[in-house]
Image (cartoon, rainbow, N blue to C red):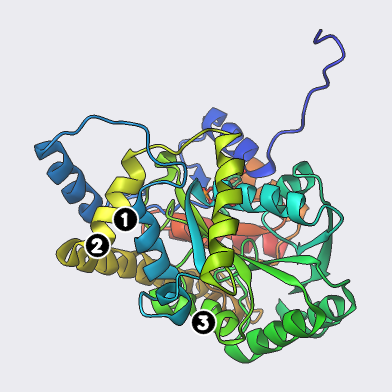
Amino acid sequence: LFAAVEMAPRDPILGLNEQFNADTNPAKVNLGVGVYYDENGKLPLLRCVAEAEAQMQAAPKARGYLPIDGIAAYDQAVQGLVFGADSAAVREARVATVQALGGTGGLKIGADFLKRLSPDAQVLISDPSWENHRALFTNAGFKVSTYPYYDAEQRGIHVAGMLATLQAAAPGTIVVLHACCHNPTGYDLSAEQWAQVVEVVKARGLVAFLDMAYQGFGEGIAEDGAVVQQFLAAGLDFFVSTSFSKSFSLYGERVGALSVVCVSPEEAKRVLSQLKIVIRTNYSNPPTHGAQVVAMVLSTPALRAMWEEELAGMRLRIREMRQALVAELKAAGVSQDLSFVTRQKGMFSYSGLNAAQMQRLRSEFGIYGVDSGRICVAALNGKNLKAVAAAMAAVIAG
Ligand code: PLP
Ligand code: TYF
């Protein structure tokens, strides 16, 4: 039966993790995978999460099956966070939200639903994008192409190219957009540039699918979600996937959601019924623990305040690391303009290093980044920063 099964390629990023774990260099640093580590290089357990779990432990409950679309209070909290509790779309019950297995699960439910709805639609993702975007939409049965995004020369975004490609796309084309903290480049569109994207999406009848995996890691919770408000204001129907993996440091609990903004409550009901079929025929219903934690934190004022403070702490530490990286690179003799490092948002920095330089970082210095030049700034800390900067300076010098 399995004789003809071919070996599948490794995930380029998760594969790097395996390589890192096998490396015996005591000075090794993992800047590959997009995970937030604290100043001690540890994955944090947020205090708000520990507190919510303590409260749950104090009144233990049996775990029945959840509804197919998840915990109602969780879905409601997601809507409040993503759209604003007082947004017209939420008040008018025009948003269908389902709990999902992380942000990836939200994308997958949306992709499967879209495939049923518009089987011949094309999907456009940014060039470059999170690798899994292409794989996930391809596996859902779509033809996936790209729109220009990264402009290596300018160290920024090729906005004109992006808009031209969207302008030329067939009506109904699904456009996957990073709502904030673009993975892998770190370059985000300005509000004015987003307005241009929204305009083209509306004029061309495209289907926007916003992937929001890093809300709160750029400028702030509301600031990072501002693009959602722009799409709402344009009166469009669109998709938003949410991930709490990073913002709650709950990677392994698989907590995320998919929200679909519709034109009427009646339409939202029909859409929800279809999303539930996708879920039912894949994994029946979602798990309880992570979503319960997130729902409790988001809806309990004291815990919510604690979360916002802890998230701000993560955001600010990343910003400090960006500034410190620039300072250390300069101190190590790098003379090029490094202002792009602090212009970038979120966990990642597209360093501009090429694949050969990234491989040298790995083999000579035990510093693991992605061959594209992406490094995870959220894995830098006071202890590893100097060594990372010195190694980067060495490979830049050639
Ligand atoms: N989308 C992007 C852009 C990401 O970087 C990630 C990272 O993991 C995800 C989605 C998936 O998030 P999750 O781990 O919650 O599935
Ligand atoms: O881009 C990253 O590093 C994160 C983590 O298949 C990740 O988004 C990477 C690859 C993958 C799943 C998650």
Q: Label 2 to label 1, Cα distance in Å?
A: 8 Å
Q: Label 3 to label 1, Cα distance in Å?
A: 22 Å
Work out whether residue 25 or residue 193 is closer to the camera in this orientation and state it: 193
Q: Earlier in the sequence, mark 3 or mark 2?
A: 3
**Residue tagged by mark 3?**
229
* 175 displayed left or right of 384: right
Q: Position of residue 80 (x, y in %)?
A: 37, 69
Identified at 59% across, 72% down, the residue is 333
- How many other residues sit within 10 Å of disc 2, few (<14), some (14-19) or many (≥20)? some
Is the N terminus in the top left, top right, bottom left or bottom right quadrant?
top right
**Residue tagged by mark 1?**
73
**Residue tagged by mark 2?**
299
Instruction: Examine the rendering and report whether any part of residue 358 can be seen.
Output: no
Q: Secondary structure at mark 1?
A: helix
Q: Position of residue 206 (x, y in %)?
A: 77, 73
Picture layout, residue 270 above or below residue 50: below
Identified at 61% across, 77% down, the residue is 188
Amino acid found under the numbered disc labelled 2: Ser
* 160 displayed left or right of 47: right
Are the residues at dot 2 and dot 1 in contact (C-beta closer than 8 Å)?
yes
* 124 displayed left or right of 73: right
Q: Secondary structure at mark 2?
A: helix
Picture layout, residue 260 above or below residue 169: above
Is the C terminus in the top left, top right, bottom left or bottom right quadrant?
bottom right
What is the number of the mark on residue 371? none
Picture layout, residue 119 above or below residue 265: above
Q: Earlier in the sequence, mark 2 or mark 1?
A: 1
Q: Label 3 to label 2, Cα distance in Å?
A: 21 Å
Work out whether residue 334 or residue 175 is closer to the camera in this orientation and state it: 175
